[in-house]
Image (cartoon, rainbow, N blue to C red):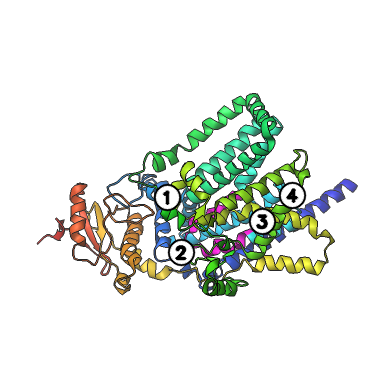
Amino acid sequence: MKDARLFFLHYRCVGTKNVAALFVALIAILVFFRQQFLSQFGYLSGDRFDGVIEVALLEHWFNVLKGVSVWSSPSYFFSYEKTLTYNDGYFLYGLVYSVFRCFSFDPFVSSELVNIVFKLIGFFGFLEASRRILNLSFGWALLGAAIFTLSNCSFVRGVHAQLYSVSLAPIEALLVFKLYKAFVASSRLQQLMWGGFSIALFSAWMMTSIYMAWFFAFFALVVLIIHLAIGGMSGIKRLIRTIAENKISIISLLTMTAVSLMPFVDVYVLGQIGEKRRSWKEVASSIPSIFDSINVGSYNLLFGGVISSAQKWCPICDIGDPGRDIGFAPIMFLLAGFVIAEIIGRKSLRAPEKNYFLYVIASACLVAWLLSIKFGSYSGWKIIYRSLPGASGLRVVSRFYLFLPVPAIGLVMWWLSRASQGWPQPIVVVLCGLLIVEEINLSPTAALDRYAEMKRTMSAPKPPAECRSFFTTATIDQSLMPSSFNVGHLYPHNVDAMLIAELLNLPTINGFASFNPPDWDFGYPSKSDYEARIANYAKRHNVIGLCRLNLTTMRWDSHWEDGQPAL
């Protein structure tokens, strides 16, 4: 009878926690995506430019699953192959997106629902990881998950929705932690199981958003180096002994890694057409300053006014906006700095039998942060840029601040769960409230007009039978953009062509991405030589059956010869 009563109480407690977690998650989602919900999904994450590119890539994966497209070659930049290499892959996003498309949601609503799903994944992933890895109580884990989900820096970078894939970081961390435990327990079965899961997720993550997956790998490398440095020769000997004792598992996991990364290597390494290396000058311009570490932007609910004043009256602060306005929320930053300093200062935590991993993670946070900022014209990131594979292709270093809060928030929650036990309850409540509120940003990030974009892309009629590929003219809104606005003359007609190509399953020579083909010259469609440039490209690539789609009239012209309609 007593056992039954204990079981009932346990079940009731678990059920209550699940309901509470779901309730908080939904509130966080409603707050984060409030602009979308209030507009009844009339305005969505992203903008007229990158937002449309994302939808085109997601529709590409839907076509792949339907069996009408080659996975590595979206229907733009025709007749180049493996054109996925020019942008993030959006693979996992595409799988989720395809589910919504199967239920007849339109492409734009489906893309926003993908963002919501990944935010939910991040919430519950952080909740579970903080409880399993840090042994946090449910309440503190729930607070950490809410802060991570509402993240100010994630909100202001909503124009690049692939960055929401940072939500996978807590899950990947938990899988790696499980793998570490499996090696400690010398359990080959668990080594292969957890190792296989972590490898599969990381490989899919790389095919989804290179930035976020690369930052995770970079931070893991810093953790490993610090672990070996602290352990000294005895630590290295233990590592060598562990490798020798588990060589079968390690060889198996390395083989899994090589196999699972083959699609990524095929497209993004072997399939790269043209140079993908960013100049150091270009990379250095995006490296945050020390003050940018708390640059939450002028729209932040609590600190926006302070940031605006600093930008105006404090030249020495070197706070850039936009682009570098994705720093830590100030209270969280100060707490994280204090907690990291205290953990590093506790010599007792260096002992393996204690919370040793806290010391390593705290040290890694400090080192990674110092490497990712600049002191005047100097930055430790130059070492990373020159030495680590893939680092020279990452232009926006400040995006690392989307990832760094994952371990930082966890450490702060761990410290608060212990330090606050003797504090007056009102102080704890106020502090927790401030940690949440300071993540809220009022910036109008939902800038993609769903209905206008549907009219521009989904109203294209079926092309003539003789059309094997197409190009587009200028869009209606392109003529309204000022001549000095270069983006307006590069993106609109190209990104609309990308989405139309996927919707009609007809390739286009147009397109725009992070990198473009070496002979891409399809900007400024209103210039008199635009169609001559199109004709030259068609001749060089032997493009047959090239049609013109007039984006102002939505009419096709299939009589395309040498850059002029046939008479």
Q: Residues within 10 Å of mark 1 (few under 14, many from 20)?
A: many
Callout in the foreground (3, 2): 3
371 in the magenta segment: no
* Pointer 4 residue: 345
* In front: label 2 or label 1: 2
Q: Quadrant of residue 526?
A: bottom left
For the residues labelled 3 and 2, the Cα–Cα distance comes to 26 Å
- Label 2: which residue? 46
* Image-quadrant location for residue 427: bottom right
Going by the numbered disc 3, the residue's amino acid type is Ile
* Percent x, y of residue 443: 53, 71
Q: Please give the name of the residue rendered at 51% of the width and 54% of the height, measured from the top-left corner.
A: 378
The residues bearing labels 2 and 1 have C-alpha atoms spaced at a distance of: 19 Å
Q: Secondary structure at mark 1?
A: helix
Left or right of residue 46: residue 546: left
Q: Describe residue 198's horizontal placement relative to residue 390 as left or right.
A: right
Give neighbour class at mark 4: few <14, some 14-19, many 20+ (Cα, 10 Å): few
